[in-house]
Amino acid sequence: MKKITYSKLGDYYYPNLQANEQPYLSKWGRAKLKYLKQNEQGLYTSLLLKNQLNEYLLDIDLEANLMYDHLIKQLIIQHNITEQLKQSNQMLWVKEMNMISKIAEEIVLNKYIKSLRFFFNYSLFFIFFNNSGISV
């Protein structure tokens, strides 16, 4: 345990305390934090007390971002969305890209955010893609 040091200011001693820096979390890390607070208070409290919450959220955030980016690329190829379509019919291109984005978001939400399983093992990541018909 760290020893607390004090600074004298006038007649009073104040502890020299520093707050732990909160890591930057993207959409997925913040969503997982919100989900844990609302639905899994036991796990949230356990991770918080063990000082492992930030590490857990950063891991989830990284994995979810990697999966989301990979899904977007694969779905663009699978749905044959090209720059030529973007130039010829912009509204259709926007519609298709929005659809792909929503599909990828829903998959990531169900696999990482609303699930208590730990997905730090890449073999599970590849099993998912092999079963879904999307090539890796």
Image (cartoon, grey):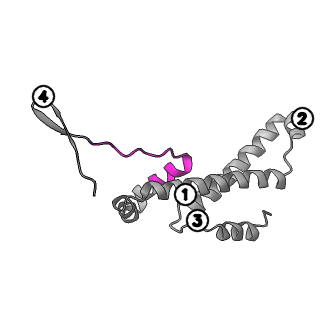
| Distance from the alpha carbon under mark 1 to that under mark 2 | 38 Å
Q: Nearer the N terminus, badge 2 or badge 3?
A: 2
Q: Nearer the N terminus, badge 1 or badge 2?
A: 1
Q: Amino acid at mark 1?
A: Ile
Q: Is residue 32 magenta?
A: yes
What residue sits right under mark 4 in the picture? 10
Q: Amino acid at mark 4?
A: Gly
Closer-to-camera residue (54/130): 54
Tell me if mark 4 has few (under 14), some (14-19) or many (20+) residues whose alpha carbon lies within 10 angstroms of its own.
Answer: few
What residue sits right under mark 2 in the picture? 88
What residue sits right under mark 1 in the picture? 60
| Distance from the alpha carbon under mark 3 to that under mark 1 | 8 Å
Question: From the viewer's perspective, is the residue at label 3 or at label 4 nearer?
Answer: 4
Q: Amino acid at mark 2?
A: Ser
What residue sits right under mark 3 in the picture? 120
| Image: magenta residue range | 17-33
Which percent across, then down, holds residue 86?
Answer: 84, 37
- The residue at 77%/51% (across/down) is 73
Q: Is residue 96 above or below residue 44?
A: above
Q: Is residue 29 left or right of residue 2?
A: right
Which percent across, then down, holds residue 98?
Answer: 71, 44
Local secondary structure at mark 3 = loop
Q: Is residue 103 left or right of residue 7?
A: right
